[in-house]
Image: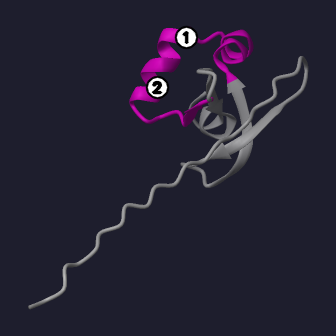
């Protein structure tokens, strides 16, 4: 009689901490670019480029902009991907 096979489930969890300071750049890892890049908030993009947040969301949903969501729920956008389309 064969022995019963044992199954193991291994899960991994990763966490990132972003510290936002006034007039300081924020760096984070962009999965799409596979490197550490400057990350921008929606407010910063709207202020610097005049792009409405609704348009930013549309570009993210079309995978034209790379983004990550912080643990606290803030959306951060990769400056490299932003530079390619704006």
- Residue 1 is left or right of residue 35, and the answer is left
Q: Quadrant of residue 42?
A: top right
Q: Residue at x 75, y 32 (%)?
A: 18
Residue 33 drawn at (x, y percent) = 60, 51
Q: Residue at x 23, y 78 (%)?
A: 5
Q: Residue at x 71, y 33 (%)?
A: 39
Q: Nearer the viewer, residue 40 or 16?
A: 16
Question: Badge 1, how many Cα within 10 Å: few under 14, some, many 20+?
Answer: few
Residue 11 drawn at (x, y percent) = 46, 55
Q: Quadrant of residue 66?
A: top right
Q: Is residue 71 above or below residue 47?
A: below
Q: Secondary structure at mark 1?
A: helix
Part of the protein shown in magenta: 41-70
Inspect the magenta stretch and tell me whether residue 56 lies in it: yes
Q: Nearer the viewer, residue 30 or 80?
A: 30
- Residues at marks 1 and 2 touching, judged by CB atoms closer than 8 Å: no
Q: Which residue is mark 2?
A: 59
């Amino acid at each position: 009689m064969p022995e019963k096979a044992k199954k193991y489930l291994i899960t991994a969890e990763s966490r990132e901490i972003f510290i936002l300071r006034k007039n300081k750049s924020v760096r984070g890892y962009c999965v799409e670019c596979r490197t550490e890049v400057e990350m921008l908030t929606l407010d910063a993009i709207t202020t610097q480029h005049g792009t409405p947040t609704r348009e930013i969301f549309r570009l993210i949903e079309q995978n034209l902009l790379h983004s990550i969501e912080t643990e606290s729920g803030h959306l951060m956008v990769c400056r490299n991907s932003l530079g390619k389309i704006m």
